[in-house]
Image (cartoon, rainbow, N blue to C red):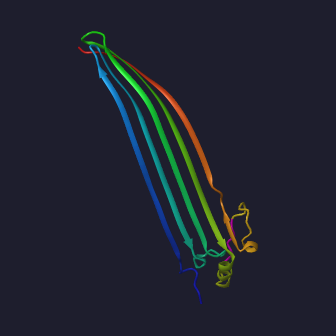
């Protein structure tokens, strides 16, 4: 006979990674009493993760082999422009003014698909394993359809911009 309490069959494979790129361009100058810098900053980050898991019916899942595919990715783009100048009021006193404007775009997507198979479920029931159905909130009928896939993709996007300033007064003793 088959002892479902001692046999577990499970395969898992996970992939993940990050690609990152950044670049800054600067212009700067010096005068009698003024030192200044202005520039542009760009960056992009793309990350992903994907996991695939197979659970055989002999591991205790009555509705056959359950395959889950978890996937997610995120993309962040940052763009900024900046300028700063330091003016020497006297030999000991200087005034610095600066400003930066930035825009961040963030996109995120995730999904999970779980697939139940009725043909493998019949084998599981033949082994005497108590039936395990998809959760009630999943709109699928594994017995009627033969195969059922659930959980739709979710995505989100967030765009933000910001403006920051700097003001400093420095005195050298």
Viewer-side residue, 172 vs 163: 163
Q: In the picture shown, does residue 165 fall above or below 14?
A: above
Residue closest to the eye, 31 or 97: 31
Question: Relative to residue 146, is residue 93 drawn left or right?
Answer: left
Q: Which image quarter is the C terminus in?
A: top left
Residue 91 within the magenta-colored segment of the rendering: no
Q: Is residue 57 left or right of residue 30?
A: right
Q: Main secondary structure of the magenta part?
A: loop
Identified at 49% across, 55% down, the residue is 48
- Residue 41 found in image quarter: top left
How many numbered circles does the render carry? 0
Residue 148 occupies which quadrant of the picture?
bottom right
Where does the N terminus fall, quadrant-wise? bottom right
Q: In the rendered structure, does residue 131 fall within the stretch colored magenta?
A: yes
The residue lying at 28 percent from left, 16 percent from top is 31
Q: Which residues are magenta?
A: 130-134
Using residue 30 as the reference point, say whether residue 117 is left or right of it: right
| Frontmost residue, 26 versus 14 | 26
Outermost residue, right direction?
144
Nearest the viewer among 4 and 91 is 91
Q: Residue at x 55, y 71 (%)?
A: 54
* Residue 159 as seen in the image, left or right of residue 43: right
User: Which residue shows up at 31% across the image and 14% down it?
Assistant: 94
> What is the x, y in percent for residue 44?
45, 44
């Amino acid at each position: 006979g088959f002892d479902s309490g001692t046999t577990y069959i499970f395969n898992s494979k996970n992939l993940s990674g990050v690609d990152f790129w950044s670049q800054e361009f600067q212009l700067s100058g010096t005068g009698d009493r003024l030192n200044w810098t202005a520039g542009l900053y760009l960056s992009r980050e793309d990350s992903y993760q994907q996991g695939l898991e197979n659970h055989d019916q002999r591991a205790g899942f009555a509705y056959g082999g359950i395959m889950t595919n978890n996937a997610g990715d995120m993309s962040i783009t940052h763009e900024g422009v900046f300028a700063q100048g330091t003016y020497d009021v006297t030999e000991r006193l200087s005034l610095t003014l600066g400003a930066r404007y930035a825009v961040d775009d963030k996109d995120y997507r995730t999904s999970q698909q779980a697939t139940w198979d009725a043909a493998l479920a019949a084998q599981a029931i033949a082994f005497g394993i108590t039936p395990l159905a998809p959760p009630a909130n999943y709109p699928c009928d594994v017995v009627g359809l033969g195969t059922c896939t659930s959980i739709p993709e979710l995505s989100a996007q967030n765009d933000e911009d910001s403006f920051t300033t700097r003001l400093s007064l420095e005195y050298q003793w």
